[in-house]
Amino acid sequence: MPMIIVHAPEAVFDVKARRSIVGELTDFALECETLPKSPFVKSTVWTYFNLYDQDTVFMGEAEATTNVVSVQIFVIEGGLDSDAKMRLIEGATTIFGRLLCTSDLIPVYIIIHEVPEENWGIFGRKADLAAFRASPIDAAAL
């Protein structure tokens, strides 16, 4: 049940593109974490888009000339092994790159933050990754 925060210039993704990204990224992130794609687990994945005016995004000392996107993905520590992290980085980059219409170097920074279970609260208690993984595939959304 990752939490995802996207930072991008506001002109990069319209509402339709953001919805497309969220749907594809949610499914892909759950797959990487080996979590069920149940309505319940999907409803615990939150994605936030922080959109910035073009003149507030810089590359070095100059205003950005490329639509650079940064994505912070918060996961419970131990939920991703090294291979799953690489798959998540590659897959998320591909998802965003498809909508950025780039073909060579895709200007997407992916940062994975691992949070110990004891530091991740949900529903008023400590998160339990094993319980989420064992939850029924037909569990209703929040």
Image (cartoon, helix red, strand yellow):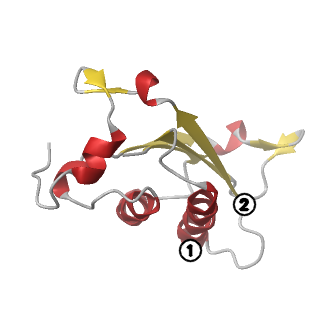
Query: Which residue occupies the foreground of this view, 54 or 99?
Result: 99
Q: Which residue is drawn at the image coordinates 34% and 46% (left, top)?
A: 45
Position of 37 with respect to 73 (left or right) is left
Q: Which residue is drawn at the image coordinates 71% and 41% (left, top)?
A: 57
**Residue occupied by mark 2:** 107
Q: Mark 1: which amino acid?
A: Arg
**Residue occupied by mark 1:** 98
Q: Secondary structure at mark 1?
A: helix
Q: Which residue is drawn at the image coordinates 28% and 59% (left, top)?
A: 36
Going from N to C along the chain, the mark reached first, 1 or 2, is 1
Query: Which residue occupies the foreground of this view, 2 or 23?
Result: 2
Position of 94 with respect to 124 (left or right) is right
Q: Which residue is drawn at the image coordinates 32% and 35% (left, top)?
A: 128
Instruction: Tell me if mark 1 has few (under 14), some (14-19) or many (20+) residues whose alpha carbon lies within 10 angstroms of its own.
Output: few
In which quadrant of the rendered view does residue 56 lie?
top right
Q: Give percent across and percent down for residue 5.
A: 50, 42
In which quadrant of the rendered view does residue 22 lie?
bottom left
| 1 and 2 marks in contact (CB < 8 Å) | no
Q: CA distance from mark 1 to mark 2?
A: 11 Å
